Image: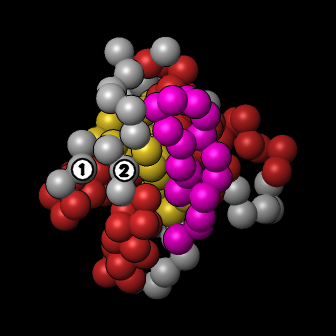
Amino acid sequence: MMPAEGTVLAFDFGLKRIGVAVGNTVLCQGQALAIIDAASNDAKFVAVAKLIEQWQPMLCVVGLPRHPDGTAHEMTVRCQRFANQLHGRFNVPIALVDERYTSAVLQAKQGERIDDQAAALILQQYFDQKA
């Protein structure tokens, strides 16, 4: 079941960059918004804080990478930690979405900065699962 009407931000967390997408529960479509490319964790969270203040999301969706067989790996744990920090710092509900196959969809665009597009795919997966 889809949550109440409102804005949703999605994050494709990476060690170097964080892709961000935005959508809403009315249209149920994700669109690429930004790529956060900051040197420190603090600087990344400053950028995240600005986006959360600007968009006032009712929910944040975070992509959760896993091995093809579904088992967790190092980035799974890092993404869960990022999701917990989002919730703790901004008091926004969090949904985790399996992102195993988003990279494969975007593989053709190798070399481009596609983090925001990956976040849009993660958000679209969330909407599709809730429809």
Boundaries of the magenta span: 20-36
In the displayed structure image, the side of residue 2 where residue 122 appears, left or right: right
Whether residue 95 can be seen here: yes
Q: Is residue 114 magenta?
A: no
User: Which mark lies nearer to you, 1 or 2?
Assistant: 2
Q: For the stretch drawn in magenta, what is the main secondary structure? A: strand
Q: Quadrant of residue 128?
A: top right
Mark 1 nearby-residue class (10 Å; few <14, some 14–19, many ≥20): some
Q: Is residue 100 visible?
A: no
Q: Is residue 24 above or below residue 44?
A: above
Q: Residue under circle 2?
A: 57
Q: Residue at x 58, y 30 (%)?
A: 27
Give coordinates of residue 130: x percent, y percent.
44, 18
Q: Secondary structure at mark 2?
A: loop
Name the kind of residue labelled 1 in the image: Val
- Kind of residue sitting beneath label 2: Pro
Disc number placed over residue 92 in the picture, else none: 1
Residue 113 image point, x, y percent: 72, 63
